Image (cartoon, grey):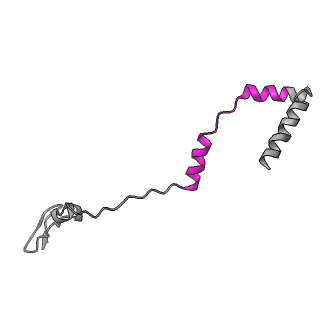
Amino acid sequence: MEIHGPGGISGPERPELKPTEAQRPDKAASTDKVADEVNISEQAQLLEKLSQVPAVRMEKVEEIKRLIEAGEYETSERIEGAARKLLEEL
């Protein structure tokens, strides 16, 4: 075989281009189907969950801080409600 520059292949043993599996007519009509598979990493799953967490409402945080500092946040109703929710979860 002789090669004359880029793309200049000639000679008695000129290479034949063979079709790929998908290009062959007998394989294109095949009923065997291969399913694609997608794997989502644990990190990507956690990021998806984080993206669904509602945004922090800073005005609400500041209001609660003010109530705690003033000693007005811990009312008997709130303490009873928190205890009730804790018992329900247990």
Question: What quarter of the picture does the N terminus occupy?
Answer: bottom left
- x then y, percent, for residue 82: 83, 38
Q: Which residues are magenta?
A: 41-66
In the image, residue 47 lies in the stretch drawn in magenta = yes
Which residue is at the front of the view, 81 or 2? 81
Which residue is at the front of the view, 75 or 13? 75
- x then y, percent, for residue 4: 13, 65
Residue drawn at the location 51% of the way across and 54% of the way down: 40
Q: Quadrant of residue 70?
A: top right
Residue drawn at the location 23% of the way across and 65% of the way down: 21
Q: Is residue 43 above or below residue 2?
A: above
Residue drawn at the location 59% of the way across and 46% of the way down: 47
- x then y, percent, for residue 73: 87, 29
Q: Is residue 40 above or below residue 58?
A: below
In the image, residue 57 lies in the stretch drawn in magenta = yes
Residue 12 left/right relative to 87: left
Q: Is residue 73 above or below residue 53?
A: above
- x then y, percent, for residue 49: 60, 45
The answer to whether residue 74 is visible is: no
Q: Quadrant of residue 64?
A: top right
The answer to whether residue 42 is visible is: yes
Residue 38 left/right relative to 59: left
Residue 62 left/right relative to 16: right
